Image (spheres, coloured by chain):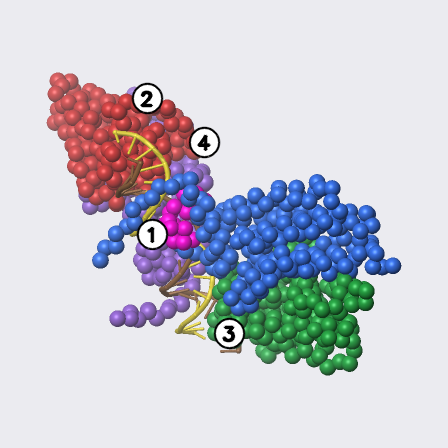
Chain colours: A red, B purple, C green, D blue, E yellow, F brown
Amino acid sequence: MQINPLPRQRRKEARPAEIIEAALLLFHQKGYSATKLDDIAHFAGVTKGTVYLYFSSKEALFKAAILETIQPNLDRIEETAMNSQASATQRLKTAMSSWASSMNECKGSITKLMIAEAGNFPELSDFYIETVVKRSRQLLIHLIQAGIDSGEFRPIDAHMLAITLFSPILLTSIWRHTYANLDPITYDLNQLSDFHLDIVFNGIALSKQS
Amino acid sequence: MQINPLPRQRRKEARPAEIIEAALLLFHQKGYSATKLDDIAHFAGVTKGTVYLYFSSKEALFKAAILETIQPNLDRIEETAMNSQASATQRLKTAMSSWASSMNECKGSITKLMIAEAGNFPELSDFYIETVVKRSRQLLIHLIQAGIDSGEFRPIDAHMLAITLFSPILLTSIWRHTYANLDPITYDLNQLSDFHLDIVFNGIALSKQS
Amino acid sequence: MQINPLPRQRRKEARPAEIIEAALLLFHQKGYSATKLDDIAHFAGVTKGTVYLYFSSKEALFKAAILETIQPNLDRIEETAMNSQASATQRLKTAMSSWASSMNECKGSITKLMIAEAGNFPELSDFYIETVVKRSRQLLIHLIQAGIDSGEFRPIDAHMLAITLFSPILLTSIWRHTYANLDPITYDLNQLSDFHLDIVFNGIALSKQS
Amino acid sequence: MQINPLPRQRRKEARPAEIIEAALLLFHQKGYSATKLDDIAHFAGVTKGTVYLYFSSKEALFKAAILETIQPNLDRIEETAMNSQASATQRLKTAMSSWASSMNECKGSITKLMIAEAGNFPELSDFYIETVVKRSRQLLIHLIQAGIDSGEFRPIDAHMLAITLFSPILLTSIWRHTYANLDPITYDLNQLSDFHLDIVFNGIALSKQS
DNA sequence: TATGAATGAGTCTTCATTCAT
DNA sequence: CATGAATGAAGACTCATTCAT
């Protein structure tokens, strides 16, 4: 059941990225503590010593792996839906859809790792919460509030709704990364998101109230 | 400078429970691997050797802790809403509410532990998925289908709806056990559940369609 | 493959002897270090605490077991053949036979234990060597010398002959206690002793030389 | 007060042999259980971790040490006397002499180790008995039988004689490795073997019978 | 750069020993 | 006397980290 590490062409520039990729995969599968540097190195096609050429410690590698994965997503998040002239409903749909898509990617579920290791990496958790979680949530809240203000939605607790909106996608993403074989969830995250949004939009539409 | 050894207390009956409690707390905070048996023992007020009187290994302790926590909830789950004459809507509300309450308890979030360690305890994960997760989900699906059959809900994918229904509660429970201090979520799980159910029921009511 | 300890009638006086018996058996089978006090206690039908009522430590138990077994044999050894009017040949035969018989008994092979643990119990070894080994050998040497002096045997190295005389019995006894199942030796020790003595007597008889 | 760590030496090829040598010595002196891996490592001039680079466990090290020592002797045993045109008497002398010589070497007394630990390493014991003990004994029996067939020896139990022949050498070898200081045996094993053979040959010669 | 042999602090686990009952 | 729960020192084994090559 050992996945064969790909024979890698020796491109020196790619090394750190390859190591991070291997690390993420294994941290995901077994958790931080249970993952051995030996395994990471072997999976990345290098030796343990090489890992230390690029990362000063296992902890540093973990942090780098998390940050490296988060970083590119950070900026993209807000642009997506912030500056648009469409209706709040439409912009929410777009935002959720784009986010669900990014969750579908292999690297989507840093969430699981952060949940598992939060207690052991408080500063990293803090950074993650502030820069990823709260920002993302704030975006949702903003869009929901816009919908309320525009009369598209009836007045509801935007924060609470934000939570209910991203929960199915986030939890399913975690689930899929955790119990892929034991409890496979066949739904696509986009499909799930659309399904939920439909119901919720229907449930909070102002017009329905009359 | 000889520290006096503590007077030995003999409380055979209480020991295992105390040790499990300590273990759960620490496994939760730090993960399985990062938790030292010394810490568990110290936290439980005994010494390492005593832990081994009751649990044959760290792994056995982990499994016992999980099972011990799951067990009492297992049977209660279905009774709750299965045998009732109320409407599907009402029974669904009751079920979600009872479940959200159980999640509020300290032991509610075995989920987090299982997610973090699933890769390292496959058989335990299998047991958990089969006896807890699938059973709970099946109950929801059953109630939703009943609502569809009775004309209370419009025909929708019951499985998908089940996922969207428990996701906010489950994820928030995990969140609270993970980022209690960094990202405190003030909502009560029951409150969140009611909020979500209201919207969803409104969104899937058959009468609204006309 | 666990031999059932006999259910013992609780005769308090017999306890130490029962414990020693159990200890000897297990020390024999597994060696001193590998034998757990728990096992000894269980085999003797008591609890660990009880062992400490009679023996102050595992080491003390080991020594007591060895000495207890050696003691009764000590005095008997010399009487056997010392004061006799028979020929040296006859007295040697009697001595060897009596000694082979004692080796046949269950407790015969303290030798094996002493060999295995000599490095860890130097004083005990010293005692054993001085009181058992050297005394026994001296007896043999004495009888051989008597035979030489009386003209029964041709003049040979009595010490060396003593070694060759007891070696087969001693080694076979050890062997039997060690490889009973893997390499069963069917010969009776007395039979073996007689066989060897016959050849040796024939080989060293003075008359044969002529 | 910081002790300077020793400069690391890299001698991959020599390591296993050095470790085995150290292990054999200590297992011999103290027995398997009583020997600490730390001691073995220290004695071999490495640290504990290094031992585990070459041997997966203490048990594996023990087995490797035994086998490594036995192996080279295995084949040599039979060649020695099997294919020779000399008289059985002569070939027996040669075989015993060659075997006594090998027993004189430091590694000669695996016997003692095997005796002490037979109970704890049944498979290893089995291998030892089958490949070393029985083969060696069979050789002796074969040569004795040849002597009987050729009329050199009177008809006797070859198996029993084999036992009496190797016992003095084997037991003395064990003795020397065990009680070197308490009961030094000054005889050379070859000397002892020759002495014994002389007597026995004299005792079993056919001509003597007449 | 890259290697991988070597290290040693850290953990799990065992078990002789103690002691309250 | 006898028990057996509790102890804690000791030992096997792991693995992040270092460093000579």
Residue linked to disc 1: B36
Q: Position of residue A153 (x, y in %)?
A: 18, 27
| Residue D43 within the segment the image draws in magenta | yes
Q: Image point 37% across, 24% down: which residue? A: A6
Q: Is residue B140 above or below residue B60?
A: above
Q: Image point 64% across, 45% down: which residue? A: D77
Camera-side residue: B42 or A149?
B42
Residue linked to disc 4: A1
Q: Is residue A10 above or below residue C195?
A: above
Structural distance between the alpha carbons of marks 3 and 2: 69 Å
Q: Image point 55% across, 68% down: which residue? A: D183
- Magenta range is D40-57
- Secondary element under disc 3, as helix, strand or loop, is loop
Residue type for callout 1: Lys
Q: Considering only order in the chain, which callout, 4 or 2, is on the residue closer to the N terminus?
A: 4
Left-right relation of A203 to A87: right
Q: Chain of mark 1?
A: B
| Residue A27 within the segment the image draws in magenta | no
The residue carrying pointer 2 sits among few (fewer than 14), some (14 to 19) or many (20 or more) residues within 10 Å by Cα, namely: few
Camera-side mark, 3 or 4: 3
Structural distance between the alpha carbons of marks 3 and 1: 36 Å
Q: Chain of mark 3?
A: C
Residue linked to disc 3: C55
Q: Is residue F10 above or below residue D105?
A: below
Camera-side residue: B139 or A40?
A40
Camera-side mark, 3 or 2: 2
Q: Position of residue C170 (x, y in %)?
A: 66, 64
Q: Image point 33% across, 30% down: which residue? A: A46
- Secondary element under disc 1, as helix, strand or loop, is loop
Q: Position of residue F5 (x, y in %)?
A: 43, 65
Structural distance between the alpha carbons of marks 1 and 4: 29 Å
Residue linked to disc 2: A9
